[in-house]
Image (cartoon, grey):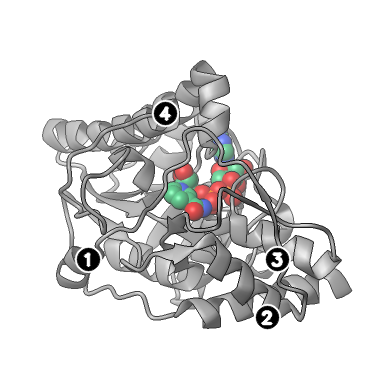
Amino acid sequence: MRVLVTGGAGFIGSNLVDRLLADGHEVHVVDDLSTGKRENLAGAAGQDRFTLHEMDIRDPALVALATELQPEVVCHLAAQISVRKSVADPVHDARLNVEGIAAVLTAAHEGRTRKVVFASSVAVYGRPATIPVPADAATDPRSPYAASKLSGEIYLATFRALYGLEYTTLVLSNVYGPRQSPDGEAGVVAIFTDALLNGTPTVLYGDGTQTRDYVFIDDVVDGFVRACGAEGNGRRFNLGTGIQTTDRRLHSLIADAAGAQDKPGFAPPRPGDLPAMAVDPVPAHDGLRWQPRTDLPTGVKKTVEWAANRRMT
Ligand SMILES: NC(=O)c1ccc[n+]([C@@H]2O[C@H](COP(=O)([O-])OP(=O)(O)OC[C@H]3O[C@@H](n4cnc5c(N)ncnc54)[C@H](O)[C@@H]3O)[C@@H](O)[C@H]2O)c1
């Protein structure tokens, strides 16, 4: 199968690329390397079934590329991914995430693509009434990022109705693992890992009881691969574990794996931060035969090992 991965030089995208290549597929990445890194594609770069197209997804040349390649599936991950940046500059967020999906869907349609698999976010649920959040819970976007992800979901349904272009939406909880960047504010696992390996201070916002649903990268990639098939057409699934982990426990797990002291500092809670989050993955068991298989201690250990090895090189 020929697959086009937008954002394929990023954290999730590059791990997906490696898995698709290992499964024998031909993979084309479209990425402008704004946050993605060439080094993430070092393993893919030597393979003849792989091509990196350094390009903005909104470049009109994307249509010509898709028309030429006719990718069977497009996995759309390229995005502005920061909630806080979206609040600071909603227009920039919309340009990337709303204009971006319209451009990608237009290209997919012109390229006779069978299916688009889209990376959405738990942000679309806002402040959910029930945890773990069911995949059919009411959406309640409370940031421009959440609004732009939800727009993406609406565009998918629109192109399906217009042209029969199939899609599956994957609502990702907190994804962690190798290649996640500790730069910036996203990715608390990467931030704690980096700090604890470097012996620099770590900070928990609030009293440490805030919870999130951490899902390991290999499991998320497996969800994307399953969604590339015929299953789950026209549906959205949560990719999470349903398990809430407190900030304090996460810190202890990472400190333990890094052989560092488990002594975080504490700072006042940040305005707008949710006190708790987890999503219900059960419909993905039925609809995609997907299950998260990596427990948090195992995933944290793999992540810390990867980060420690990278520091050596
Ligand atoms: N990491 C998470 O926990 C998480 C959670 C929910 C949803 N998501 C979604 O998953 C997707 C991937 O996230 P990630 O964590 O791998 O982020 P990332 O920043 O590592 O990857 C995004 C990639 O998109 C590329 N990109 C950005 N704008 C582009 C443009 N205009 N044209 C071409 N390429 C562009 C970047 O260079 C980067 O390689 C995003 O859509 C994000 O919203 C991630």
Decide which of tag 2 and tag 4 comes sooner along the chain: 4
Neighbor class of circle 3 (other Cα within 10 Å; few <14, some 14-19, many 20+) is many
Which residue is outermost to the top? 91
User: Which secondary structure lies at badge 3?
Assistant: helix
Q: Position of residue 81 (x, y in %)?
A: 52, 40
Q: Which residue in the structure is indicated by mark 4? A: 143
Q: Is residue 91 above or below residue 41?
A: above
Q: Disc 2 residue type? A: Ala
Q: Is 157 left, or right, of 81 in this rendering?
A: left
Split into 4 quadrants, where in the image is the N terminus?
bottom left
Q: Which residue in the structure is indicated by mark 2? A: 257
Q: Which residue in the structure is indicated by mark 1? A: 284
Tell me the distance, in whole angstroms, between the alpha carbons under discs 2 and 4.
34 Å
Tell me the distance, in whole angstroms, between the alpha carbons under discs 4 and 1.
26 Å
Q: Is residue 107 above or below residue 119?
A: above
Tell me the distance, in whole angstroms, between the alpha carbons under discs 2 and 1.
30 Å
Cβ atoms at labels 3 and 2 below 8 Å apart: no
* Nearest the eye: 88 or 285: 88
Q: Which residue in the structure is indicated by mark 3? A: 193
